[in-house]
Amino acid sequence: MPDITTPSGVKDILKEYDININRGLGQNFLVDSNILEKMVEAACLDAGDRVVEIGPGLGALTGALVDALPEGQVLAVEKDSRLCQVLQDLFHQEENVEIICGDALEFNWAEELTARGFGKGGYQVVANLPYYITSPIIRLFLELSPTPESLIFMVQKEVGERIAASPGSKAYGTLSIAVQYYAEPEMIYQVPSTVFWPRPEVESVILRLKPGENREERADNEELFFKIVRALFQQRRKTIRNSLSKAAEIDLSRELVGRALERAGINSRIRGEKLTWQEIVELSDIINALLAEVGD
Ligand code: SAM
């Protein structure tokens, strides 16, 4: 069997199975054992852990995970049926790997994970993601029950920077808050395009997301919270008071916004991009309460 952690090994196996790369499915294979190791290390796995992998491709990361989990389990979901065939051939003797051929966005994760006992002792998600589904996959797993203990993703560098951005920075926006609301992000390692074959046009980073640590700080009305987030970032150059009182999605009077900001101790002249997600939760809760008072 060719070594799938080298470009020549990947080319050989694709040739053997008569497979052409499908760029539309984000097929950039990891061909650097050092980076594979870094991804596995970032997950801090114990021998008996359970791991979900999205898009196993030709199995390079899957193999590294299997080695790290002699008593554990890997559930890998690959969309490309031709690659599924390679994976079945590669791993059919491994008892602790299950390859599922299907679309990770269509998969019934809640049911399938529970059926396999993944929810009980916890599980992690580790993936070199096809970049075109980065946001929906992150969202899917952050909102999923059972929630993963951690998510280790290879993502496009610019997306990783947006997710981990701090308030006031250029990269900080709705994506930062949508993720930080559910999980603590950490950029673990910058990855050059040379570790993939074929080489993507963008640089990448290994990103770790730790859900759960912020759970007690949820908004009373999450729908309102996300409307407020969108309003604050739609016109970044406006002051908080202006962006909230002119938001098309929420009908808030200038007076009510002023009162809410005062109650939250937030200067109404600063821009929304300066607020942490926790401050926005607090503001959203106050606005929610004021709206209820007005409605009474
Ligand atoms: N894990 C392999 C590696 O590290 O070399 C391959 C990573 S490659 C960036 C992304 C993989 O995701 C490809 O194998 C692609 O076919 C697969 N893929 C793309 N869209 C998918 C989807 N919706 N569901 C599951 N797998 C998908």
Image (cartoon, grey):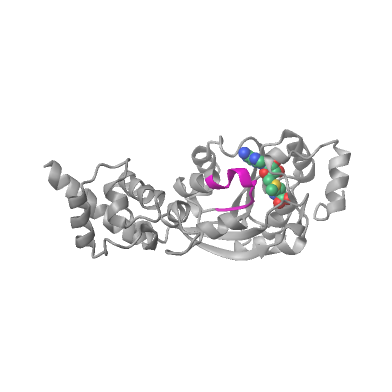
Q: Residue at coordinates 86% horizontally, 35% vertically from top-left?
A: 18
Left or right of 52 in this view: 267: left
How many labels sit on residues? 0
The answer to if 130 sits in the magenta stretch is: yes
**Residue drawn at (35%, 48%), measured in percent from left and top?**
231
**Image spot of residue 101 (x, y percent):** 67, 36
Residue 20 appears in the figure: yes
Q: For residue 155, what is the image quadrant?
A: bottom right
Q: Residue at x 33, y 54 (%)?
A: 218
Task: Residue 183: give x, y in percent of width and height.
Answer: 46, 57
User: Splitting the image into four quadrants, where does ligand 1 fall?
Assistant: top right
2 lies left or right of 167: right
- Place residue 48 in its image quadrant: bottom right
Q: Which residue is outermost to the left?
A: 296
Residue 35 highlighted magenta (yes or no): no
105 versus 118 height, above or below: above
Please give the range of residues in magenta. 124-135
In which quadrant is the C terminus drawn?
A: top left
Residue at x 36% of width, y 52% of height? 232
Q: Position of residue 145 (x, y in %)?
A: 45, 45
Q: Which one is in front, 295 or 80?
A: 295
Query: Residue 78's spot in the image, x, y percent?
Result: 67, 40
Q: Is residue 49 visible?
A: no
